[in-house]
Image: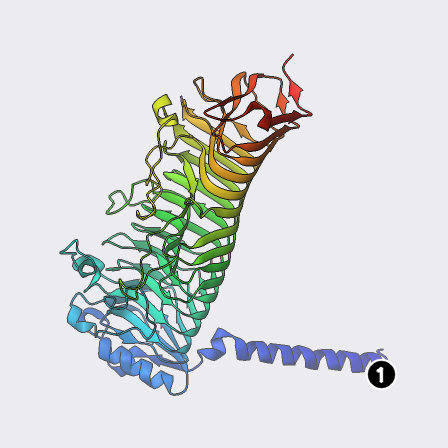
Amino acid sequence: MLSQDKKRCVCIGVILAGVIVFFSFLQSDTFASSVTHNVRDYGAVGDGFQLDTQAIQRAVDECAKGGGQVLLPGGTYLSGTIFMKNNVTLHISEGATLLGSTDIEDYPATTSPVRHYGDSWVLYSLIYGANLENIAITGRGLIDGQGGAYKVTTKKKPDRYMNRPYVIRFIDCRHVRVENIRMGNSAMWMQHYLGCEDVTIRGIKVYNHCNKNNDMIDIDGCRNVIISDCIGDTDDDAMTLKSTSERPCENVTITNCILSSHCNAIKMGTESHGGFRNITISNIVVKPSEHDSRIYGREEGLGGISLLIVDGGVMEGVTISNIRIEGTTSPIFMRLGNRGRTYMGPEVTREVGRIRNVKISNVVATGADTIGCSITGLPEHPIENLTLSNIHITFKGGGTLEDAHKTVPEKPSSYPESTIFGKLPAYGFYIRHANGVTLDKVNLAFEHVDARPALVCDDVASLDVSGLRALNPQSDESLIRLSDTQDAFISEFRSDDDLDLFLSVEGDKTDGIYLTGNDFSKVNRIFEVQKGAVEEEVKLKGNVLKQ
């Protein structure tokens, strides 16, 4: 028998459990979408031939009066622009396809309420919303933009971008949710979220290989964004963060995704006006595209992780971890440039931006191309406070002595791509114009004979290299070359094979090179100085030397 107190506790527990279940129900998708408006009840045919735009729009407009769900049941619904409304979920059922019209006349031109780079030529969308709240696209159906029907007829900007509708475009919206949907064949970017807040994108699949500018997703000047459990295979960039207006892209978490691209799998900053803050990217697999032909880039992809600031703005507080990269040209590419592009007219100039406080860790990459990885700022504008830790990269190799001693141009205004400098002087990392760089447990290797150093640093201050493991260059080159570098600490190095020369130091600005706690037992010569460097600036302490 239960005592009165125990009975009272049980009753209270049951009541509390009921309250929790009730409020969970109130917040659930089921409740939010409990009022369903079937587009067939509004005249949609769903045969893939008759235009269903008006019927779908009637369902959306009616749904917006009280909130709920607009349902596309099994069938193929040919449509032009659908204008989303507040408190509406567009649900595309499994077995249903929303098919974009191939007639541009079915897409009314829309002007962005947020001024940004592209607002004069991005005019058309299949699904469009601006200044909305509580909107969603869900279901396991397909959105097919039929973008291959929109041919690019000019190379001139911005004409080549016009008259090509996006599939999804949401501007200045709040509480946006896109889940589980499949998307393919956009005439431009697949989806563009501009100046939105509280965005959740989960479980989507994107295949975009029918036209130029076929990005997977573009998060542009948005804040409070969560992207997870997505799969994308695109001709152009896949997971893309931009800032085409003065609004920063901030508070973004991206995780548990599989990405393929002929261009860049993870890319941030081609447009960088407002900058980027507090970005976390983790648990990503980057693999080659399953699409044989390409429009842009390379079949194997141009970049795994590409972090860029070229149009002003600040990138800071970026953390990227647990990334598996297979077969891209350059697994890690960072560039602080000065293209200075602006949406405000040629009379407005932009200052050089900044990249600082970036951490990349736990990266395994194989099949990287011969070019190598570059991390480059500009004179007087260094990349600041960068940490690379637990990085394992295998390159194809094949670099020559000529490559090892090439002069790398600055190219401040060139388009930022991993191929910008051609083959780099290092088979692993070429770092120039940087301040506060930490390389911790970086492991570098190549498949074919390479004559270049593993690491070359030029105009770098406050460098810390710890636990480096790298295949020795197949030449008389040193494993590491430091040029005009100050306050460099190299420790915990160990070579598995005999190495003729570990370190080459050059440049009359070189100052304070410290080698501490290294195992040089298989190294014939620890360092040499040339081109104005002074031997006294290299200091050794606590190293194991060859007997």
Residue 529, image x and y in percent? 51, 22
Relative to the observer, which residue lies in front, 416 or 19?
416
Above or below — where is 101 with respect to 310? below
Residue 145, image x and y in percent? 25, 63
- Horizontally, residue 6 falls left or right of residue 74, namely right
Relative to the observer, which residue lies in front, 417 or 488?
488
Q: In the rendered image, which quarter contains the C terminus?
A: top right
Above or below — where is 380 with respect to 422? below
Residue 466 visible from this viewpoint: no
The disc labelled 1 sits on which kind of residue?
A: Gln
Please say which color scheme the image uses.
rainbow
Residue at numbered disc 1: 4
Residue at left 45%, top 17%? 476
Say which quarter of the image contains residue 158: bottom left
- Horizontally, residue 413 falls left or right of residue 107, namely right
Counting labels gives 1
Question: Which residue is outermost to the bottom?
Answer: 65
Above or below — where is 263 with respect to 71? above
Residue 239, image x and y in percent? 40, 54
Relative to the observer, which residue lies in front, 173 or 246?
246
Residue 18 visible from this viewpoint: yes
Q: What element carries label 1?
A: helix
